Amino acid sequence: MHKDLAIKVENLSKVYRLYDKSVDRLKELVHPLRKKYHKEFYALNDINFEIKKGETIGIIGKNGSGKSTLLKILSGVVTPTSGKVYVLGRISSLLELGIGFNPEFTGIQNIYLNGTIMGCAKRDIDDKVDEILSFADIGDFAYQPVKMYSSGMFARLAFAVAINVDPDILIIDEALSVGDVAFQSKCYRKFNDFKKAGKTILLVTHSLDSIIKYCDRGIVLDKGIKIEETSAKEAVDIYKRLMVDCYFDQEEKINDEDKKESQKIIWKNGIPVNPNYLEYGNRKAEIIDAGIFDSLNKLSNTLENGEFFEFRIKVRFNETIQEPIFAYVIKDIKGTEITGTNTLIESEVTGVFHKGDIAYVKFKQELNLQNQSYMVSFGCTNYTLEDFEVYHRLYDFFIFQVISNKSTSGVFDPKSQIYIERI
Amino acid sequence: MPKPMINIIKQFCLFWIDLIKSRRLILDLTINDFRTKYLGSYLGIMWAFIQPSITILIFWFVFEVGFKSKPMDNCPFILWLMAGIIPWFLFSEGVMNATNSILDNSYLVKKVSFRVSVLPIIKILSALIIHVFFLGVTFLMFFILGYRPNVYSIQLIYYLFCLSVLVIGISWATSSLAVYFRDTNQIVSVFLQFGFWLTPVFWSFDILPVKYYFIVRLNPVYYIVQGYRESLIYHEWFWNSPNITLYFWVETLALFFIGAILFKNLKPYFADEL
């Protein structure tokens, strides 16, 4: 294994044997003809990847996609069915909201118990107890059995212990989601310290923002298969498409003809389209054109802070659809959502569209953003009886620049008016 | 010596070296285990000592005051009984607790990667703490009734070692099976009840016809019960009965390795089953 690597995974698979009844397991063991009583379930199927030292990797996927199993195998708790895992350095892991805590023990006793199991000397733990307790911030609950803790306290203590045993590799599975905002931000600050110290972090979370913010790369899993290993932002986009089941049919649908057709349309030619935009959806309705218009009603990808501007889209309907939802979202370049709205949120009645109809939608608003580049996405979706249906989405379709004559902190300009008096 | 034999001996030695290396972990976890057992009760760890004391008190009252039992081989019955029943207590406590050790510690097995094979050993050690206390009481009673500890008492260390190896072997097998078949601990407790009456704890070996001796000798715990009595009462060295010593060790080591192999093969899937 190369020196720069922290983790290397080769052809990793994990198969669980599912039995209808627990007696079947026994029957299978003693069956003279080796009859199979189990069904095989691939929690992970032929996974390969490498993680370099100092990288922060986000692992995302739907529930049941194999994320937790993967982390358990990396932590050494679960044994893979086949394939190899190489890990260089000490691992500290927080699996499924937990750590080896004995529910009957107090917080302090558990700190010692865990330290011991991780192989720390008692003196080292003595030195760290204060730091752990102050990070966990659980007050007098440190002297209560952990079964009395709220889930937030439990996660806080577990996280504090996991980061304080001085690991080389930190594995966090969903543990942060139960903490409140203050604790989460504290954790993320700690992540940054870890990154600076050249430590490797593996993160499973459903908070896509944190993946974009903290991870260098993302690995997308679906049904035990590695779909993609790419930049954090792209991984999140793929995950979002997976969530609405549009990932796999996307490739067939963006073909050259579609692209050519869209080139003919006027608005899109007026301003450059982001070459890396993503589109997907079942195309019961299609966004055939989109544009950004400034206060002078001209197509533009440069807007001025404070002016009124419009996003306009044209949507062609290929089926009869009642009450479609038209939407836009503005993100910064890192992919963090800044704002966005849709006709449902704004209680606009959109009515019924028949096959062949074209809807012309204008979103008009004042610009309150700071000097930097933003991306805008458009979408046409709907809540049908049972499901959320995506007809067509154009992710990060345009990149536009905002010019502002002042620079407030952050991205939002609150348009403050300031009064000062001497009293 | 044939090669597999050397290999086995090597493995056996490596195991003890490994155990000594991780003594801190084992010690800390034993203390934890001891603590967990009595957690929440007002008298806490005191119970670990109150219970054995009362057991002995009851025995004394029933057999000496109540039944006025006759001395066995010129030794007061209560002393004779205690010398035999104490190692049995350790054996049954150890096996019973260790059988559940993986299930009881599922919160560790599922979340942390560490040497799971020490879990049964920890349960055995925590039974050993109580045993040492029992031994102390026993010595005290022997002393009161006029038996001074002598050089033969040292032999108890040897028998304690024998018992530990035996219990570790059995409990590796039972504890790993218990993860897969939850019925294991019920089965084990039934066997222990049988074992108690099959082992000459309450009755003397001499009441059996000679032709049945071999059946009793099949039972490895017999060697230890007899050994405790030889150390404390009859004052015999274990090397004076080489046949049964050899027999015990063959049997115990076989159990030890069967247990170790079973545990090693089943261990990778513990986390999947718990």
Image (spheres, helix red, strand yellow):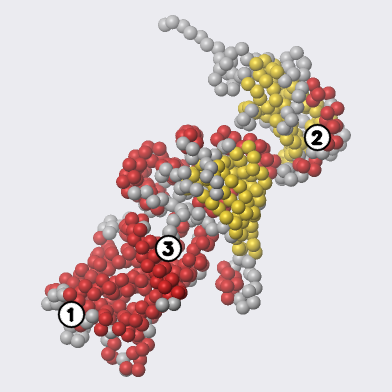
The image shows residue A40 at horizontal and vertical percentages of 64, 62
Q: Residues within 10 Å of mark 2 (few under 14, many from 20)?
A: many
Q: CA distance from mark 2 to mark 1?
A: 98 Å
Q: Chain of mark 1?
A: B
Disc on res. B117: 3
Residue A291 appears in the picture as rendered: yes
**Circle 3 Cα neighbour tier, 10 Å, few/some/many (<14 / 14–19 / ≥20):** some
C-alpha gap between disc 2 and disc 3:
61 Å
Residue A228 drawn at (x, y percent): 66, 44
Q: Residue furthest right?
A: A356
Give the residue displayed 56% in from the left and 17% down from the top: A408
> What residue is drawn where x is 63% and y is 69%?
A37
Q: Position of residue B210 (x, y in %)?
A: 32, 93
Q: Residue at x 60, y 56 (%)?
A: A83
Considering the numbered disc 1 on the image, is that residue within a helix, a strand or a loop? helix
Q: Which residue is mark 1?
A: B65
Nearer to us: label 2 or label 1: 2
Residue with the mark numbered 2: A286
Of residues A326 and A263, which is closer to you in this image? Answer: A263
Q: Nearer the viewer, mark 2 or mark 3?
A: 3
Quote the CA–CA distance across marks 3 and 1. Answer: 46 Å
Location of the N terminus of chain B (image quadrant): bottom left
Q: Is residue B107 left or right of residue A325?
A: left
The answer to whether the residues at label 2 and label 3 have Cβ atoms under 8 Å apart is no
Q: Is residue A232 above or below residue A270?
A: below
Task: Look at 28% across and 64% down and name the residue there.
Answer: B129
Instruction: Identify the amino acid type marked 3.
Output: Ser
Same subunit: marks 2 and 1: no
Residue A358's place in the image compared with B229, above or below, is above
Height in image: B53 above or below B110?
Answer: below
Could you tell me the amino acid type at mark 1? Val
